[in-house]
C-alpha cells in the first residue's frame, strides 16, 4: 500500500536563496508527522508546497497515488484541511460562518451542515453558544478551535497545521495540545504539524522530521532522535530545548 502523500525530488528557491533542497518524503495514512527545525529551515515552505500554495521548482507532490498539478490543485485542497497560526479567521464572519464557509460554497444541505457543526463543537470542546460571536469576541484558544473546526468540516483525508499553537499562552497551549492528540486519535487523522517546539512534536507526533537549511537531517521518533542522533546538529538542536520532556 502506497503512502497517502509522497514528495519526490521537490525543491524550491527564491532567487538565489534555496528554501528547500531536493527532498523525498513519505507520509503514511493515520499518523501524525511533525516537521521541526530552527527558523528558516524550510518546514513552512515544505508545508505550502504540499498544499500547492507554492509550485515546486522541480519534483512532484503525489497525493493518494496521483500527482498534484496546477490543474487539479483546487480539487486536491478540498480533500485537505489547513490550520495556520492565530487561526486565519475572517474577522467579518461569525465563528459559525467561518466554519461553514466551504460547505455553503459546495451547497451542502442545511441539515448536513448543522449535524457536522454539532459534531465538531463536541469534538473540539467549543461552546455552541459562542458560534454567533465574531473572532474579536473570542479568546485566542477559541479562535484556534474555530480554525480547527473549519479545517475538519469537510472530513479531510489529511490535516496540515502550520504552528497552530505558537501564539497561545502556555496553559491554553497545553489544553489544546491534549485536545489535538485526542482528536487525531479519535478520527485516525493523517496530520502534518509544523512546530518549533520539540516537546510539542514529541507529544503529538508519531514521527518527527527534523530539518535544517532546507534539508531533512533525520526522521524518526523523539527517542530515536535523542538517543541516536544522525549528526552533531541533531544533538545541538535537542539540547537547546532544555524544557522538552520526552
Image (tube, rainbow, N blue to C red):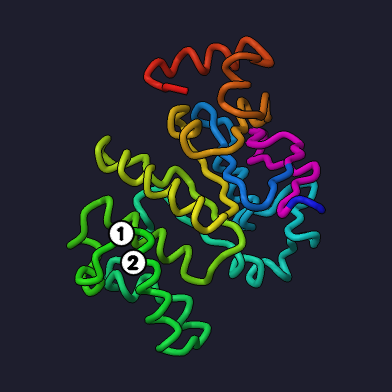
Which residue is label 2 attached to? Answer: 121
Residue at 80% x, 62% y: name it.
66
Coordinates of residue 150 in the picture (x, y in percent): 42, 66
Vertical arrangement, residue 51 with respect to residue 229, above or below? below
Mark 1 Cα shell of 10 Å, populated few (<14), some (14-19), many (≥20)? few
Q: Residue furthest left?
A: 137
| 38 or 170: nearer the viewer | 170
Seen in the image, is 108 located left or right of residue 17? left
Our reading of the magenta stretch's main secondary structure is strand
Q: CA–CA distance between discs 2 and 1?
A: 6 Å
Which residue is label 1 attached to? Answer: 125
Dots 2, 1 in contact, CB < 8 A: yes
Q: Report the span colored magenta.
A: 4-25
Vertical arrangement, residue 66 with respect to residue 113, above or below? above
Residue at 64% x, 15% y: name it.
229
Residue at 73% x, 58% y: name it.
63
Amino acid at each position: 500500500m502506497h503512502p497517502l502523500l509522497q514528495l519526490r525530488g521537490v525543491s524550491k528557491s527564491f532567487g538565489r536563496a534555496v528554501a528547500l533542497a531536493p527532498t523525498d518524503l513519505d507520509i503514511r495514512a493515520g499518523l501524525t508527522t511533525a516537521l521541526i527545525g530552527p527558523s528558516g529551515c524550510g518546514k513552512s515552505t515544505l508545508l505550502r508546497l504540499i498544499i500547492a500554495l507554492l509550485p515546486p521548482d522541480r519534483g512532484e507532490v503525489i497525493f493518494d497515488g496521483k500527482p498534484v498539478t496546477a490543474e487539479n490543485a483546487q480539487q486536491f485542497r478540498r480533500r485537505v484541511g489547513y490550520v495556520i497560526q492565530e487561526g486565519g479567521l475572517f474577522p467579518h464572519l461569525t465563528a459559525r460562518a467561518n466554519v461553514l464557509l466551504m460547505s455553503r460554497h459546495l451547497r451542502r444541505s442545511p441539515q448536513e451542515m448543522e449535524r457536522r457543526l454539532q459534531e465538531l463543537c463536541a469534538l473540539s470542546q467549543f461552546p455552541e453558544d459562542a458560534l454567533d460571536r465574531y473572532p474579536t469576541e473570542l479568546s485566542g484558544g477559541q479562535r484556534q478551535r474555530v480554525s480547527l473546526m473549519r479545517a475538519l468540516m469537510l472530513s479531510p483525508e489529511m490535516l496540515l497545521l502550520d504552528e497552530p499553537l505558537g501564539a497561545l499562552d502556555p496553559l491554553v497551549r497545553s489544553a489544546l495540545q491534549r485536545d489535538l492528540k485526542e482528536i487525531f486519535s479519535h478520527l485516525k487523522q493523517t496530520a502534518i504539524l509544523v512546530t518549533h517546539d520539540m516537546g510539542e512534536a514529541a507529544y503529538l507526533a508519531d514521527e518527527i522530521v527534523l530539518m535544517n537549511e532546507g534539508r531533512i537531517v533525520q526522521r524518526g521518533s523523539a527517542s530515536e532522535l535523542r538517543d541516536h542522533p544522525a549528526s552533531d546538529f541533531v544533538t545541538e538542536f535537542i539540547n537547546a530545548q532544555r524544557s522538552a520532556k520526552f
